[in-house]
Image: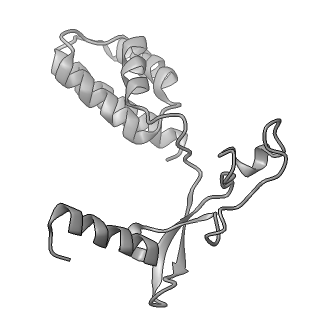
Amino acid sequence: MDLESKRSLISIRLQMLIDVFGKRVTDEGLEALRRIYCDALENFPEKVICKGFSRAEQTLERFPTPKTLAGICGEAMPPQTWRYDFRPSEDVDPEFGTPVKVLIDPDPNCAQCRAPKSEHPTSTCKEYKTSGLGDDRVMFKPQDCPEGRAFLKKLREIAGRKP
């Protein structure tokens, strides 16, 4: 989502928040509020912005300040260990030979120290090591690879469900 689309989303959700709390704002005041809230929230992902506004509408008793709303959005952020740079692609199912959707990791983690490949060598790990299970950059859905299907089958057995 580009910056203008994100600012538009923030403006729309801000107007909804103003309506929910019955805040009276002049046209000049509304433009100033939009600018301030956009500056505070434009660095968050789209889904986090939506979650933050929804949570503010549902839980707060007073109209939130930009700092309060940014704090709510910060709480809705996923852990910092998750990276958003996976790229969607297609690959071939190793077992059936059919095309499946996969995610490509441009900077896979080392099998020994779990640090990204771009950070190697590190003080604790001198050489990047692969897992030995194929291409470490490719991430399949469990139902699209043999190991994942075996895991899901075993999980269904444990849960007592039919395959």
Please name the residue shown 69% across and 44% down the image: 115
Query: Looking at the image, can residue 13 be seen?
Result: yes
State which quadrant residue 23 falls in.
top left
Please name the residue shown 49% across and 47% down the image: 1
Question: Is residue 128 found left or right of 147 in the rendered image?
Answer: right
Q: Nearer the viewer, residue 53 or 22?
A: 53
Query: Looking at the image, can residue 145 be seen?
Result: no
State which quadrant residue 155 falls in.
bottom left
Q: How many marks?
A: 0
Please name the residue shown 43% across and 12% down the image: 67
* Rendered view: 114 above or below 103: above
Quadrant (top left/top right/bottom left/bottom right) for the C terminus? bottom left
Asked which colour scheme the image uses, the reply is one colour
Where in the figure is residue 6, as x and y percent of width and height?
46, 38
Q: Nearer the viewer, residue 103 or 121?
A: 121
Question: Is residue 46 found left or right of 161 in the rendered image?
Answer: right
* Rendered view: 88 above or below 4: below
Where in the figure is residue 141, as x and y percent of width and height?
42, 67
Where in the figure is residue 158, as x and y percent of width and height?
22, 63
* Rendered view: 80 above or below 152: above
